Amino acid sequence: MSSPSTPGDAELLAHGELTVRGQVREASNAVLYCSVAYEGREAACVYKPVAGEQPLWDFPDGTLAQREVAAYEISEATGWGLVPPTVLRDGPYGEGMVQLWIEADPEARLLALTEDDAPGEGWKAVGPAQIDEDRTALLVHADTPGLRRLAVLDAVINNGDRKGGHLLPAPGGRLYGIDHGVTFHVDDKLRTLLWGWAGEELPAEAAGVLDGLERSLAPGAPLATRLGELLTGAEVAAVRARVGALRATGRHPEPSGQWPAIPWPPV
């Protein structure tokens, strides 16, 4: 079990000795639960070897681990710390992504179903959900600053798979998002449960973060250079374009209507 991230976690993950303890069976790709130890420190982590990635029709083979690391790099550049420390390194089954394990708070509620016509105070509507053949309910998510930040991050990285199970509320109120392998496509792939703010004006905080990202993504800037080690040139340019578009509209994106806006399964 791991507590929320602390300074030095990236070094621990990058240089520590990985020991496989088990496997997350319900994952579509190989996800190994590990411990990592380095200079007297030990933590739990997830190791996703590239060799265990299943091919996808719309993403190049063997690139999901790099995309997970790129999502972490963007998250760190925002200053929001929404993605657990994540590194690309060699492991027992070859190169892969290694990420700090975050134990979710079982008492936190971020998603809910209501049979009311509108979400209650503190909630945002996602859309109708079929409960059984004769009954539907309204799917809602919490209206919190952390989730709203994550919605902005997903728009930047073009997250095609923001499911409910990828939201980790940590003890103390900290929020993390995980599973960012299906990201950074050059085409619009945004699929998420966090549509509650669609079309709304971005908060001033988010606008300021996007300004900073635009500077950090300028050709030759450190973040742009780092992303160039993980993504293609076209994908880095697409990140830059998405940030520019968000700044220009000043609003959260809306579903395009050209494909399912919510991933399946949603949780």
Image (cartoon, rainbow, N blue to C red):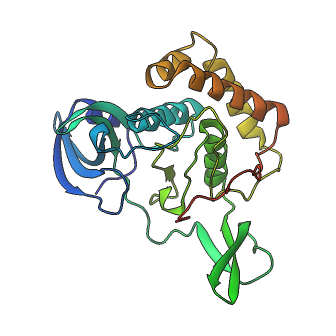
Q: Position of residue 103 (x, y in %)?
A: 37, 59
Occupied quadrant, residue 211: top right
User: Residue extending furthest bottom?
Assistant: 134
Q: Is residue 185 above or below residue 161?
A: above
Question: Residue, x 66% and y 18% (percent of image)?
Answer: 215
Question: Residue, x 24% and y 57% (percent of image)?
Answer: 23
Residue 28 or 202: which is nearer the viewer? 28
Q: Position of residue 56 (x, y in %)?
A: 45, 44
Q: Position of residue 152 (x, y in %)?
A: 67, 43
Looking at the image, residue 144 sits to the left or right of residue 31; the answer is right
Looking at the image, residue 128 sits to the left or right of residue 11; the answer is right
The quadrant of the rendering that contains the N terminus is bottom left
Q: Is residue 7 visible in the rendered structure shown here? A: no
Q: Position of residue 185 (x, y in %)?
A: 58, 35
Residue 27 or 224: which is nearer the viewer? 27
Question: Residue, x 59% and y 22% (percent of image)?
Answer: 234
Occupied quadrant, residue 216: top right
Q: Is residue 116 visible in the rendered structure shown here? A: yes
